[in-house]
Image (cartoon, grey):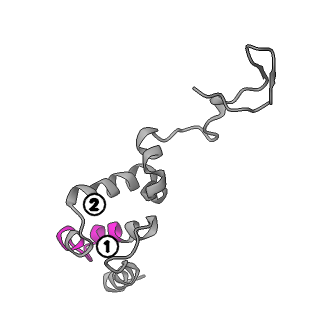
Amino acid sequence: MATQTSISARVIDQLPLPGQRWVASRKAAVIEAVRVGTLSLEEACRRYELCPDEFNSWVAARDKHGVPGLRTTRFQIYRDNPRRPSAAPGLGERIAASSSADGVEAPVGMLINA
């Protein structure tokens, strides 16, 4: 069983350097360091030039969507669309077979623009 000291040392090794580009895994490492007490919220905010609101938004995104929710490119999608419980999201938006109003056949499985 790992001791608290060895866990803390591993978390510190995974922390990004100040000024590094933020990716989901680096944000998750900082969140984990604060969670286990290796790094205080104040230290994290000072070290990485974050405001507490930004850090808390990371925590909320991670809690709601997991580490993928921390990706910047996907933030708006996760923010605007709550997680769907369905195993196959988007199936309701697909059509099995369709024809448009002008009589032109649409391909099977084509997405409908809402």
- The residue to which callout 2 is attached is 55
Image-quadrant location for residue 49: bottom left
- Mark 2 closeness class: few <14, some 14–19, many ≥20 residues within 10 Å: some
Q: Quadrant of residue 85?
A: top right
Q: Quadrant of residue 17?
A: bottom left
Residue 39 part of the magenta segment: yes
Stretch of the chain drawn in magenta: 30-44
- Residue 93 x/y as whole percent: 63, 29
- Label of residue 33 in the image: 1
* Outermost residue, left side: 42
The prevailing secondary structure element of the residues shown in magenta is helix
Asked if residue 59 is among those painted magenta in the image, a careful observer would answer no
Q: Is residue 94 above or below residue 30?
A: above
Q: Amino acid type of disc 2?
A: Phe
Judging from the image, what secondary structure is the residue with disc 2 in?
helix
Position of 82 relative to 74 (above/below): above
Please, is residue 74 above or below residue 52 in the view? above
Label 1 neighbourhood size at 10 Å, few (<14), some (14-19), many (20+)?
many
Under circle 1, the secondary element is: helix
The amino acid at mark 1 is Ala
**Quarter holding the C terminus?**
top right
Q: Nearer the viewer, residue 104 or 7?
A: 104
Q: Which mark is residue 11?
A: none
Residue 40 vs 75, above or below: the answer is below
